[in-house]
Image (cartoon, rainbow, N blue to C red):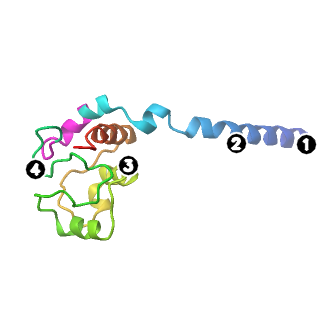
């Protein structure tokens, strides 16, 4: 009887190893984000940030071209000392860094001025990042 259980457990473990990457990996849509949905989620950011052809610095900097850019590199905005220092140390707004920052800005960057608590849902962050990417060349 014990031998049967061991064989069954080994088969179950082997099946779990084969199936778990498929079940645990995000769908291509979630990994890439949905820019159209990101525009809606960005409304939470729009109280302080603008993006698009008419974007101007406000309470926060305009976010045109932020994806792939060094932190604190937009001209005409007075960044916090913490963000300026991070930019000088080489922080670049990659998708991964944006995701971490948007999840919890204060934890990602101690001493920053952004008052926003963050986007708790990974899908919301992916969608906002996809939306931001649309303005990468601006």
Q: Residue 94, relative to residue 22: is it above or below?
A: below
User: How dense is the environment of label 4, judged by Cα within 10 Å: few (below 14), some, or many (20 and up)?
Assistant: some
CA gap, disc 2 and disc 4: 49 Å
CA gap, disc 1 and disc 4: 69 Å
Which residue lies under the disc numbered 3?
A: 95
Label 4: element kind: loop
Q: Nearer the viewer, residue 88 or 115?
A: 88
Q: Nearer the viewer, residue 112 or 137?
A: 137
Badge 1 or badge 2: first in the primary sequence? 1
CA gap, disc 3 and disc 4: 22 Å
Which residue lies under the disc numbered 1?
A: 3
Badge 2 or badge 4: first in the primary sequence? 2
Instruction: Determine contact: label 2, label 4, CB under 8 Å.
Output: no
Name the residue located 25 percent from the left edge and 47 percent from the top edge.
65
Which residue lies under the disc numbered 2?
A: 17
Instruction: Determine contact: label 1, label 4, CB under 8 Å.
Output: no
- Point out residue 95 in the picture as x, y percentages from the top left corner: 38, 49
Q: Nearer the viewer, mark 1 or mark 4?
A: 4
Label 3: element kind: helix
User: How dense is the environment of label 3, judged by Cα within 10 Å: few (below 14), some, or many (20 and up)?
Assistant: some
Name the residue located 10 percent from the left edge and 50 percent from the top edge.
57
Q: Which stretch is magenta?
A: 40-50
Q: How many marks?
A: 4
Q: Nearer the viewer, residue 104 or 26?
A: 26
Badge 3 or badge 2: first in the primary sequence? 2
Badge 1 or badge 4: first in the primary sequence? 1
- Point out residue 73 in the picture as x, y percentages from the top left corner: 22, 60
Q: Nearer the viewer, mark 2 or mark 4?
A: 4
Q: Is residue 137 visible?
A: yes
């Amino acid at each position: 009887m014990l031998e049967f259980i061991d064989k069954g457990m080994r088969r179950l473990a082997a099946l779990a190893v084969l199936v778990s990457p498929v079940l645990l990996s995000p769908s291509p849509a979630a990994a890439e984000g949905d820019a159209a949905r990101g525009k809606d989620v960005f409304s939470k950011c729009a109280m302080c940030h603008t993006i698009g052809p008419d974007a101007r610095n406000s309470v926060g900097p305009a976010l045109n071209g932020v994806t792939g850019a060094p932190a604190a590199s937009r001209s005409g905005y007075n960044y916090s000392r913490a963000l300026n220092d991070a930019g000088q140390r080489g922080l670049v707004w990659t998708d991964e860094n944006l995701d971490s920052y948007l999840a919890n800005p204060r934890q990602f960057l101690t001493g920053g001025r952004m008052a926003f608590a963050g986007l708790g849902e990974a899908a919301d962050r992916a969608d906002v990042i996809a939306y931001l990417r649309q303005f990468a060349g601006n």
